[in-house]
């Protein structure tokens, strides 16, 4: 079992930031509104995430550490309508097989907190009482301690942490209503309080994309049938030479998709000064059954069932918005 899990781990966990991504997605799936991340030594020493979500009941802790034990797909039909972020049911088991992982949880409806961990060849799970407020903590120490080849592949502490920071910034951009705290080696690095009002959202935007972006960007909000495009566009004359802020989220996931970037680029083309690139943070929502998110295993690419309509909707709406901005 341990080996099977370690092999699976190769697909899910490439480096500390991929662990962080999986754990944060789990916490969000559990309805958490506040996440605290404590990272030590770029994540290779420790990654600890505490959330205030729905928790895991005692009887399900063992299951949560087992492979393909996802609670998120009930039937094949669900595969077509994946609403939650995680759905493969192997992240925790995989990470647990290549680290020292402890899962501590207290669902609000349960009196006590319990902790669980798996160890040994057969990944035997131990469950013990614990102290914990409502919610879940996943505490991971010594990532890749038993897979030296992978451990050797890790870059410097600084580089690994910057990947983690990127993951958190991206997710914080997609979930304004959730609060995030990121600490590294005991120091606070990011603090994003929950942002409800437009002003609070702009404050978070400034922290993540820079004050310049937040000042220059103009909001867009367009609906056509069940397509919804929202977010912020930087007016063409303020766009920069580098495309460092080109964030596109589809149904809450960050994407690097050719169809989408093409539509945005084409919309900007007419107005953009030479050698500048579009600068934007955009959110596109459409019914889940109109998108396949499994095109790419890292889930950065999507396939739309109505490709043409999606492309033209985004193109024309951004074009309209830019026209007003330059006028
Ligand atoms: P998946 O997310 O694909 O279902 P994971 O291995 O990531 O698989 O998680 C296994 C299960 O553990 C989840 O389905 C969920 O039921 C539970 N779980 C994991 N993390 C949390 C959390 N932070 N809060 C509540 N439940 C969690
Ligand atoms: Mg998951």
Image (tube, rainbow, N blue to C red):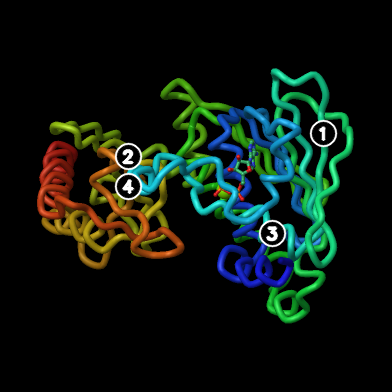
Q: x%, y% of residue 132?
A: 82, 29
What's the CA distance linking mark 4 and mark 1? 34 Å
**Which disc number belongs to residue 80?**
4
Between disc 2 and disc 4, the foreground one is 4
Q: Tag 2 or tag 1, which sits nearer the N-term?
A: 1
Quadrant of the image occupied by residue 25: top right
Q: Secondary structure at mark 1?
A: strand
Disc 3 crowd rating (10 Å Cα; few below 14, some 14-19, many 20+) is many
- Residue hosting label 2: 232
User: Quick one: 291 or 78, which is closer to the camera?
Assistant: 78
Residue 51, by quadrant, is: top right
314 lies above or below 178? below
Q: Which mark is residue 95?
A: 3
The residues bearing labels 1 and 3 have C-alpha atoms spaced at a distance of 19 Å
Q: Mark 4: which secondary structure?
A: helix
Q: Quadrant of the C terminus?
A: top left
Closer mark to the observer between disc 4 and disc 3? 4
Q: Are marks 3 and 2 in contact (CB under 8 Å)?
A: no
Distance from the alpha carbon under mark 1 to that under mark 2: 43 Å
Q: Is the residue indicated by label 3 positioned so its CB lies within 8 Å of ligand 1?
A: yes
**Labels 2 and 4: the sequence-earlier one:** 4
Mark 1, residues whose alpha carbon is within 10 Å: few (<14), some, or many (≥20)? many
Q: Earlier in the sequence, mark 4 or mark 1?
A: 4
Tell me the mark number nearer the camera, choosing from 1 and 3.
1
Quarter of the image for the N terminus: give it.
bottom right
- Image coordinates for residue 64, horizontal then vertical, percent: 67, 45
* Circle 2: element type: strand
Disc 2 to disc 4, how far (Cα)?
Answer: 30 Å
Q: Which residue is mark 1?
A: 114
Q: Earlier in the sequence, mark 4 or mark 3?
A: 4
């Amino acid at each position: 079992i341990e080996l099977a899990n370690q092999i699976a781990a190769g697909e899910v966990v490439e480096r500390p930031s991929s662990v962080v991504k999986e754990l944060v997605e789990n916490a969000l799936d559990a309805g958490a509104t506040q996440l605290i991340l404590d990272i030590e030594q770029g994540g290779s020493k420790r990654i600890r995430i505490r959330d205030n979500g729905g928790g895991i009941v005692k009887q399900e802790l063992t299951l949560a550490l087992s492979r393909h034990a996802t609670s998120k797909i009930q039937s094949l039909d669900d595969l077509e309508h994946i609403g939650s972020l995680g759905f493969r049911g192997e992240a925790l088991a995989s990470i647990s097989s290549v680290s020292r992982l402890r899962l501590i949880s207290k669902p609000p409806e349960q009196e006590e907190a319990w902790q669980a961990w798996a160890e040994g060849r057969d990944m035997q799970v131990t469950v013990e009482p614990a102290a914990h407020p409502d919610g879940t903590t996943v505490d991971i120490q010594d990532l890749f301690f038993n897979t030296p080849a992978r451990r050797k592949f890790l870059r410097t502490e600084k580089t690994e942490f910057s990947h983690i920071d990127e993951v958190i910034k991206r997710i914080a951009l997609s979930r304004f209503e959730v609060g995030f705290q990121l600490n590294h080696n005991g120091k606070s690095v990011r603090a994003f309080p929950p942002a409800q009002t437009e002003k609070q959202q702009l404050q978070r935007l400034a922290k993540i994309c820079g004050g310049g972006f937040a000042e220059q960007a103009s909001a867009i909000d367009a609906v056509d049938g069940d397509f919804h495009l929202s977010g912020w566009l930087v007016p063409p004359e303020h766009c920069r030479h580098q495309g460092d802020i080109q964030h596109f989220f589809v149904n809450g996931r960050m994407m690097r998709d050719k169809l989408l970037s093409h539509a945005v680029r084409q919309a900007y083309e007419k107005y953009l000064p030479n050698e500048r690139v579009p600068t934007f943070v955009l959110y596109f929502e459409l019914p889940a059954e109109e998108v396949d998110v499994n095109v790419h295993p890292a889930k950065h690419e999507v396939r739309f069932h109505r490709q043409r309509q999606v492309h033209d909707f985004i193109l024309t709406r951004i074009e309209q918005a830019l026209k007003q901005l330059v006028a």
